[in-house]
Image: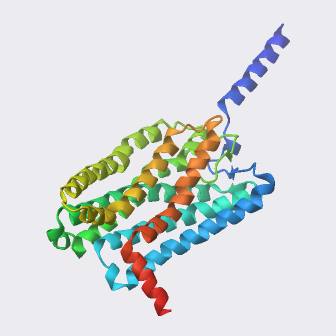
Amino acid sequence: MNIMSVFQAENQTIQYMNQTRMPINQTRMPDFIMLGFGNLHSFSILFFILFLAIFLFTVFGNLLIIILVSTNAQLQSPMYYFLCHLSFSDLVMSTNIVPNLLGTVLSRGKKMTYIECITQLYFYSGIIVTECILLSVMSYDRYLAICNPLRYYSIMDFKLRTFLSLWPWLLGLTFNLTGVLPMSKFNFCNDNTIDHFYCDLLPLQRLSCSDTSVIELEGILLSVPVFIFPSGFIIVTYVYIFHTIVKIPSTTGKHKTFSTCSSHLIVVGTFYGTLIAKYMIPSKGNSLLINKIVSLLHTVFTPLCNPIIYSLRNQDIKKTLKKVSRQK
């Protein structure tokens, strides 16, 4: 009877240890295995070439906008100044995510150290914050240009536009520290595989054995100044913009005025649409693949679409491209 009691106690201890998920070798800095899109099989080479081509076009397109705006006098208005910052943020996003994606596609999985994972998370979350605020700054620029055109250049002078362009980067590089720094104190459990193609906060929270409630609360609180305020500000500015456009008597004048902000409006819709879809879709069960596809649209295709949208819909950039091509 005593022997049976001993065996039962041992079995209960083993079950308890399995349920509590003991940390990996008692270390806080494990290596992670990024699964990516591991079920591509014979299509892996094809998708590798596709993603590599997208990455190269993204880098080329955003660098082209930065160079055009920096070297041409007709593109020196505040709108194109902010566009340069948007293109640079897209460059950071793409170079931070896509090389890791290429590694997971080619090798059907990729090993990442803890430091690499946290660094990628830091720059990814930082760029998200930066672009949210930067897009609201660009909407304010369009509001001034359309609703107060006579005072546009006097208000949006060099000092103000420099301040408005640096502020999103400062907030982006500091706000996300509240979520990234606590990660350095986390213990991680036996499962070190992340079924994604980059390090995101939610998968790391699920792997952690530590209490993540503080970070979850911080994420909810920070969503107000980072997401809700900028998106609400964009909505308000465009209400005023549309109200001003409606008052323009001629159809040609309405079309010409709206064309100056249509590119920005499309970029805002694409950015916030994919961002909302990404965090509304749960990362469990059958929806995991959908979540990865939405994340792919958000981190890979959006940085590619932004320079295309501005190049195709903006007459000044199209004229500058034609001028540069003729000189060559």
Q: Residue at x 40, y 59 (%)?
A: 130
**Residue 241: where, in percent of width, then height?**
24, 56
The answer, for residue 275, to whether it is visible in the render is: yes
Residue 201 x/y as whole percent = 53, 47
320 with respect to 106 (left or right): left
Residue closest to the eye, 239 or 299:
239
Residue at image position (62%, 54%) is 114
Q: How is the image coloured?
A: rainbow
* Image quarter of residue 324: bottom left
- Which of the pair 156/204 is nearer the observer? 156
Task: Identify the residue at horizontal 71%, vertical 56% (top origin).
Answer: 110
Q: Quadrant of the N terminus?
A: top right
Say which of 147 and 288 sits in front.
Answer: 147
Q: Position of residue 148 (x, y in %)?
A: 17, 64
Q: Where residue 164 sits in the image (x, y, percent)?
A: 29, 65
Q: How many marks?
A: 0
Q: Nearer the viewer, residue 253 or 228?
A: 253
Residue 188, visible in the rendered structure: no
The single residue placed furthest to the top in the displayed view is: 1
Q: Is residue 255 left or right of residue 271?
A: left
Quarter of the rendering containing residue 322: bottom left
